[in-house]
Amino acid sequence: MQGPIVVVDGDEAQCRNLCDVLERDHYSTTALHSLLNLEEEIRETGRRVVILDLDTLPVNNRLFRTLRRTNPGVCILGLSSRSFHPELEEAMSKYIHACLAKPVDDEELIFWVKSLGDL
């Protein structure tokens, strides 16, 4: 079992689908549907990779700054149906390693997770 990965997505069905894709490739996942317990989950489990849906969650630059300050080893993958997020310019340039287009291509997701695991 590889991992661990936390998937945070306000859309429960999409979150479950992402977790299923990752688990088929032998990754350990935790599904969250809000940002409420994200920092605690990272801290308690040592999760290194976080996948965040930028469309269904109330994210901002401050959230990403705080996540990286309190968990410097965390790698963040964003998911979005939008190609441009001007409100997240700082996060996109400094804290988010990659942003995948929705609907997510399974092979691309696994590629990025493997790449982040090698960091």
Image (cartoon, grey):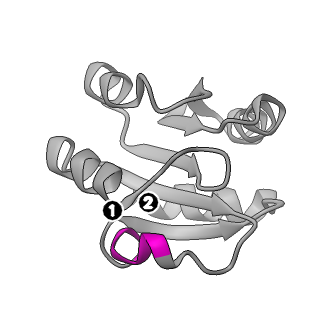
Q: Main secondary structure of the magenta part?
A: helix
- Tell me which amino acid carries mark 2: Leu
Which numbered disc covers residue 116?
Answer: 2
Residue 81 sits above or below residue 45 on the image: below
Residue interval drawn in magenta:
87-92
What residue is drawn where x is 57% and y is 37%?
8
Q: Is residue 69 above or below residue 83?
A: above
Is residue 117 at all visible to an observer of this figure?
A: no
| Residue 115 visible in the snapshot | yes
Q: Tell me which amino acid carries mark 1.
A: Leu
Please indicate whether residue 92 sits to the left or right of residue 72 in the image.
right
- Counting from the top left corner in percent of width and height, residue 63 is at 33, 49
Q: Position of residue 50 (x, y in %)?
A: 47, 45
Circles 2 and 1: CB distance less than 8 Å?
Answer: yes
1 vs 64, left or right, is right
In percent of width and height, residue 76 lies at 43, 55
Residue 70 on the magenta span:
no
Residue at the disc numbered 1: 119
Residue in view at x 51 percent, y 58 percent: 77
Q: What mark, if any, has residue 3 been given in the picture?
A: none
Q: Nearer the viewer, residue 56 or 14?
A: 56
Q: Residues within 10 Å of mark 1 (few under 14, many from 20)?
A: few
